[in-house]
Image (spheres, grey):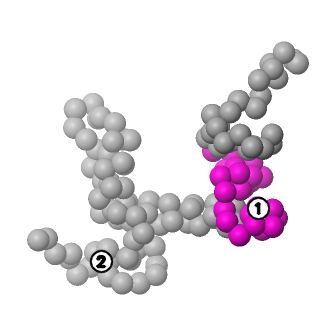
Amino acid sequence: MRQARPYSGIFCGGVSARTGPHALPLARIKKIMKRSAGETADGGARMISGEAPVVFSKACELFVAELTRRAWAATLDGKRRTVHREDVATAVHNTDLFDFLVDVVTADTAGGDDDVHDDDNVGDGALG
């Protein structure tokens, strides 16, 4: 089994962005990065440094934590103690930072229908 080098900092305990333990598996992050990078001109996969997956792991952790905080606030506004999909959708719709997720989540304004692929904007194109 390969041992971590003394200066890598990847397997050392701690709370900084450069040290572990990591909530997400670094090998999985690296695999996603390689798949997302596509192929280079010479046909090979791109190289990824050892620190890049650590940074992505921390970024994902912070992203999930922030989205969870905002969804929890929406849950408390609804006087509930369980986070629902609608709470996450509300957090996405109310935060400019999460605009890239608007197409992924839809707020259930009609209520009662749990279909994720609802098209709430049917007919809006005829108004223009």
Q: Is residue 11 left or right of residue 64?
A: left
The residue sitting at the bottom extreme is 13
Q: Amino acid at mark 2?
A: Phe
Q: Residue furthest right?
A: 127
- Residue 74 tag number: 1
Give the residue drawn at x 29%, y 77%: 11
Position of the N terminus, as image quadrant, is: bottom left
Q: Residue at x 22, y 32 (%)?
A: 43
Q: Main secondary structure of the magenta part?
A: helix
Q: Using the rendered image of the protein, determine whether residue 55 is visible from the camera's viewpoint.
A: no
Quadrant placement of the C terminus? top right
Image x and y of residue 111, in percent = 78, 44
Task: Place residue 123 in its image quadrant.
Answer: top right
List x then y, in percent, for residue 127.
88, 18
106 with respect to 9 (left or right): right
Q: Are marks 2 and 1 in contact (CB under 8 Å)?
A: no
Residue displayed at 76% across by 61% down? 74
Please give the range of residues in magenta.
Answer: 73-102
Residue 55: image location, x then y, percent: 43, 64
Q: Nearer the viewer, residue 36 or 80?
A: 80
Q: Which residue is mark 2?
A: 11
Q: Is residue 18 magenta?
A: no
Q: Is residue 2 above or below residue 31?
A: below
Q: Residues within 10 Å of mark 1 (few under 14, many from 20)?
A: many
Magenta stretch contains residue 77: yes
